[in-house]
Amino acid sequence: MKNMNLNLLVWRQKDAGSKGKMESYIAENISLDMSFLEMLDQVNEDLIKKGLDPIEFDSDCREGICGACGVVVNGQVHGPQRATTVCQLYMRNFKDKDKIVIEPFRARAFPVIRDLVIDRSSFDRIIMAGGYISVNTGGAPDANSIPVAKEIVDKAMDAAACIGCGACVAACPNASASLFTAAKISHLALLPQGKIERKKRAEKMVSQMDKEGFGDCSNIGECEAACPKEISISHIARMKREYFRAVVDEIEK
Amino acid sequence: MLPVFTALRSSVGKKILMAMTAFSLVLFVVVHLLGNLKLLSRNSNAFNIYAHKMMSLGGLLYVAEIGLLLLFLTHIIIAGLIFIGKRNARPVGYYMNKRLCKPGYNFIGSTTMIYTGAMILIFLVVHLMHFKFGPGIKDGYIKEVDGKSVRDLHRLVVEGFQSFWYVSFYTAVISLLGIHLSHGFWSAFQSLGINHPRYTPLILGVGILIAITLSLGFISLPVLLYFIG
Ligand code: HEM
Ligand code: FES
C-alpha cells in the first residue's frame, strides 16, 4: 500500500493559562503500519525541522498497558477502534486525504497543560483517598495462601484492568469519573485483602471524586463503550452497593 | 464518619433520591392512567364518581398531594443539580463529538432526560391550571353524584380534547414521557446498585415496554375522545 497524506486539525494551547485553538497541519508520507502516535511523532519531526513547536502529547509504554496516552480522535476517545488505546491504534484505520480532528480529553478536573497533554492528578488523589490496602511490610506472603473463588477473581481482574487513562471521563457527557472510581473500589472490595477496608474506602474515594469536580453519573454507558479495557458499568453498580454498605454501617454504630 | 445527610448529598446519594422519587412517580403515573381510563366508560359519569371518591378522602388527599409535590420537587431539584454539575464539569466542550454508547443502552433517552423532563414540567403546570385550578361548579360544570352536585370533570376533559392543538401538545408531551422512561426505568435500577448480567437486559426491555404501554395508554384518551367525541 502507498503511504498517505492526511489533513490534521489539532488543538494547540501554549499552557494551562492561555486560550487554545484548533490548527491545521498536513501529515505527509504516513505509512499504514505506523501507530497513531508514531504518525504524530513524524509530524513533530517535520515541525521541528521547520523550527516550529512540536505538538505535545502524553505517552509512555505505547503498548496499551500504562494509561499515559489518550486523545480524542474525530470525536471518539482513543480513536475509532474499540477496546484500544490511541497508542495501539494503527494508521490502517484511516484513508489517504482523511481529515483527522485531534483534541485533548475535556473535563474541569483534567485541565489542559499544553496542547494534548492534560493533568490527571485528580485521579491520583482519588486513589490516595483509599485505593489501596494497608499491609505491613515484611516477607512476601506465600502465593495462593488465601483461596479466592474463580468467579470472584475474574470479576476483580476485569476491574483491575483499568489503566487510569481517563477515557471514561472524556467520553462521559457529564464528565463523570464513576467508571474509574468504581473500577478501583470494585477491584479491591472483591478480594479478601481489600475487604477489610472496604467501607472506609468506598466512602473516601466517592467523596474525593465528588470534590474533584467531576459530573454525576447518568447511566448513559458512554464510558463503557470508550474504555480501552472494556470495563463494564456493572462495577458502577457495585460501587453504589459498597457506598450503601458504608452508610448502613454508620447507622448501625 | 458518614452521616446519612452527607451521604445523600454525595453523587451516589443524589442518584438514590433520583431513583426513589422516579419509581414513586412511575407508580403515580400508572395509577393516574388507570383512573383516566374511566373516561372511556360508557357511563359518562364514571369518571366523576371516581373523582368524587378521591375528593371525599379529605385530609388524606392533602397528605397525598403534598407527598406528590415533594416527590416532584426532589426529582426536579436533583435533576437541576445534576445538570448544573455536568455543565461545570466540562467548561470547554469538544470540537467534534461522536456518541458511541454501548449497544443495548438507549442514548436518545439517556442524554435528553433534562429536556424531556423539562417538557413534562411545563405540561404539568398547564395540566394543573386546566384541571386542578380550572373551571368548576360555579362555571356551570355540574353533575350529580349520589345526589350531590359535583364538578363535571368528564365534560371538562372531553371539551379540552376537542382542541386539535391541545390533543397534539398532549400527545407530544406524553411521547416525551415515554422517552424519559425508556432510559429512566433501567437507569433507576442501576442508580440503586442493581445490575446483573442476566436481569439487567430484562430490566432494560421491561423499561421500554412500560414506556410504550404508558404512552399509548395516555395517548389513547385524547385521540379517542377527539375522534369519537
Ligand atoms: C417534572 C419534571 C421532570 C424532570 C425535570 C425530570 C428530570 C429528570 C432527569 C434530568 C433525570 C436524569 C437524572 C440523571 O441524569 O441521572 C431523570 C431521571 C428519571 N426520571 Fe425524571 N423528570 C421529571 C419527571 C419525571 C416523571 C413524571 C417521571 C415518572 C413518570 C420521571 C421518571 C424518571 C426516572 C425513572 C428517572 C431515572 C432515575 C435514575 O436515573 O436513577 N421523571 N428525570
Ligand atoms: S502509552 Fe501506555 S497505554 Fe498508551
Image: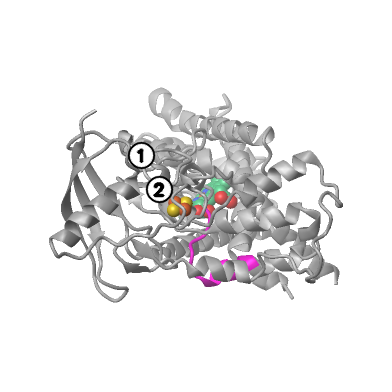
Q: What colour scheme does the image use?
A: one colour
> Which residue has dot 2 on it?
A87
Q: Is residue B71 left or right of residue B175?
A: right
Tell me the CA gap for discs 1 and 2.
8 Å
- Dot 1: within a 10 Å radius of its alpha carbon, few (fewer than 14), some, or many (20 or more) residues? many
Give residue B172's position: percent from left, percent from top: 38, 38
Q: Give the residues drawn in magenta, as a range.
A: A205-217
In the displayed structure, A57 sits above or below B35; it is below
Residue A30 quadrant: top left
Nearer to us in this view, B110 or B44: B110
Give residue A199's position: percent from left, percent from top: 75, 65
Residue shown at the point (48%, 47%) measured from the top left: A64
User: What chain letter is assigned to the residue under label 1?
Assistant: A
Secondary structure at numbered mark 1: loop
**Distance from mark 1 CB to nearest ligand 2 atom below 8 Å:** no
**Distance from mark 2 CB to nearest ligand 2 atom below 8 Å:** yes
Give residue A194's position: percent from left, percent from top: 76, 59
Residue shown at the point (24%, 28%) measured from the top left: A1
Quadrant of the image containing the C terminus of chain B: top left
In the displayed structure, B174 sits above or below A2; it is below
Give residue B192's position: percent from left, percent from top: 66, 51
Q: Is residue A25 left or right of residue B68?
A: left
Q: Is residue B196 left or right of residue A95?
A: right
In the displayed structure, B93 sits above or below A138; it is above
- Dot 2: within a 10 Å radius of its alpha carbon, few (fewer than 14), some, or many (20 or more) residues? many
Secondary structure at numbered mark 2: helix
> Which residue has dot 1 on it?
A90
Residue A158 quadrant: top right
Tags 1 and 2 on a common chain = yes
User: What chain letter is assigned to the residue under label 2?
Assistant: A
